[in-house]
Amino acid sequence: MTTSLPHSIPDSQLGLSASEIHLLRQHQQIALSPSVHQQQQAYAHSTTSTRGRGHARTSASTSRATSAASSQPGNRLVLDPGSLALLGQHFERLMGAIQNRVENLTAQTQISTISQSARAGAAMAAADAEIARFHDILRQIDELEVEFDKVRHIRDIVKGFRSRVEGLERKVEGRGRR
């Protein structure tokens, strides 16, 4: 009596949430689709030495497992080594693509942050320059107000002298007529 491992198990028994099961089903279909499988075989063939043995054994096993899983009712995770290897490779590529995207977005975020920081620094420098200019204008206004007060004081003195001079002229003219 030989015990054989099941060829697949229901994916609902994997302890995954509904959204994770949905994602697993989608990616299992992608990983085990013939076009993806052929691309993986071509890649594997170009990167490994097979010593003439080829990939017929894995390919046939994976194809049978894929057919068996797709013909079974319900959604199941195929357990043969070839299918699991393809699914694992698919997820590794997917995780690599996600990691690359995260790194790309992180780099863009850093560039944006540096740019914003530079703009903020420039804006702060411009604001500081405008504040200094404003303080200079206020200082000049204060100086002009002091000068204005001096001139008004002198004007008032001159007015006073002028009144006195006019008063003296009237006195002198009044004495000269008599």
Image: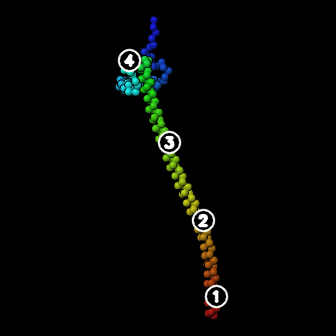
Q: Residue 57 carries which label?
A: 4
Q: What residue type is labelled 2?
A: Asp
Please give left or right for residue 144 compared with residue 89 in the image: right
What quarter of the picture does the C terminus occupy? bottom right
Q: How crowded is mark 2: few (under 14 residues within 10 Å), some or many (20 or more)?
A: few
Q: Earlier in the sequence, mark 2 or mark 1?
A: 2
Label 2, label 1: how far apart the Cα atoms are: 43 Å
Residue position for label 1: 171
Judge whether residue 128 can be spotted in this image: yes
Q: In the figure, residue 1 lies in which quadrant?
A: top left
Q: Position of residue 4 (x, y in %)?
A: 45, 11
* Foreground label between 2 and 4: 4
Mark pair 3, 1: CA separation: 90 Å
> Disc 2 vs disc 1: Cβ atoms closer than 8 Å?
no
Q: Of the residues tagged 4 and 3, which is closer to the observer?
A: 4
Q: Position of residue 44 (x, y in %)?
A: 39, 25
> What residue sits right under mark 2 in the picture?
142
Under tag 3, what secondary structure? helix
Image quadrant assignment for residue 73: top left
Q: What element carries label 4?
A: helix
Q: Which of 54 and 95 is in front in this view?
A: 54
132 or 171: which is nearer to us? Answer: 132
Q: Are marks 4 and 3 in contact (CB under 8 Å)?
A: no
- What amino acid type should be assigned to the residue bearing mark 1? Lys
56 lies left or right of 95: left
Badge 2 element: helix
The label shown at residue 110 is 3
Instruction: Answer above or below: position of 9 versus 173.
Output: above
- Disc 3 to disc 2, how far (Cα)? 47 Å
